[in-house]
Image: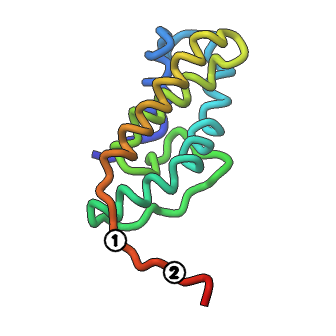
Amino acid sequence: MPMINQTIYENALRLLGLSSDAEGNEDYEDRAPYLIASFCSEAEKTDGLLRRSLGLEPTPVFGHVWLALDELFPLSEQLAPIACLYVAAMLVLDEDSELSDTLYDRFCDAMLTLRGSIAASVEAIRDIYS
């Protein structure tokens, strides 16, 4: 089921123990579209491998700098929970580096686990010495 970027942002807030209805989250909401785009740029290659292994359409074109919160999350749904970890880690990077590090470690572990679950593909080896 397609997810919108707003849901990624709200789930990231929940990971931080915050509510999207609370006042004082304006800075987080302003930064979230940039952070989601940053995650998508970083995970684009993984998404392409995942889509190819599942026989899905290629990753759609998306903005690599800013993604509106009311737009659909452009990557595969398997990457959505990982995006939440990344966004949460980046939101608190300056104010709670220990929590940010913990969330970032979880993000890295989740990406490695997902990458490890993608089926390998057989490709020809390019001869660069001929």
Q: Residue at x 39, y 33 (%)?
A: 81
Q: Which residue is mark 2?
A: 126
The residue under label 1 is 122
Local packing at callout 1 (Cα closer than 10 Å; few below 14, some 14-19, many 20+) is few
Q: Residue furthest right?
A: 94
Secondary structure at badge 2 equals loop
Q: Amino acid at mark 2?
A: Arg
Q: Is residue 7 visible?
A: no
> Residue at (63%, 17%) from the top-left corner?
92
Q: Residue at x 51, y 24 (%)?
A: 105
Image position of 21 (left or right of 128)? left
User: Which quarter of the figure is the C terminus placed in?
Assistant: bottom right
Which x, y percent locates residue 78? 34, 43
Residue 72 is situated, as x and y percent measured from the top left of the image, at 44, 48
Q: Is residue 24 visible?
A: yes
Front residue of 39 and 19: 39
| 118 versus 6 height, above or below | below
In the rendering, at what x and y percent does residue 67 appear? Answer: 59, 46
Mark count: 2
Mark 1: secondary structure: loop
24 up-or-down from 50: above or below: above
How far apart are the two marked residues, 1 and 2, measured between alpha carbons?
Answer: 13 Å
Q: Is residue 91 above or below residue 122?
A: above
Asked whether the residues under the numbered discs 1 and 2 touch, taking CB atoms below 8 Å apart as contact, a structural biologist would say no
73 relative to 107, above or below: below
Where is residue 6 drawn, in percent x and y?
Answer: 48, 34
How dense is the environment of label 2, judged by Cα within 10 Å: few (below 14), some, or many (20 and up)?
few
Quadrant where the N terminus is found in the figure: top left
* Three-letter amino acid code of the residue under disc 1: Val
The residue positioned 45% from the left and 32% from the top of the image is 8
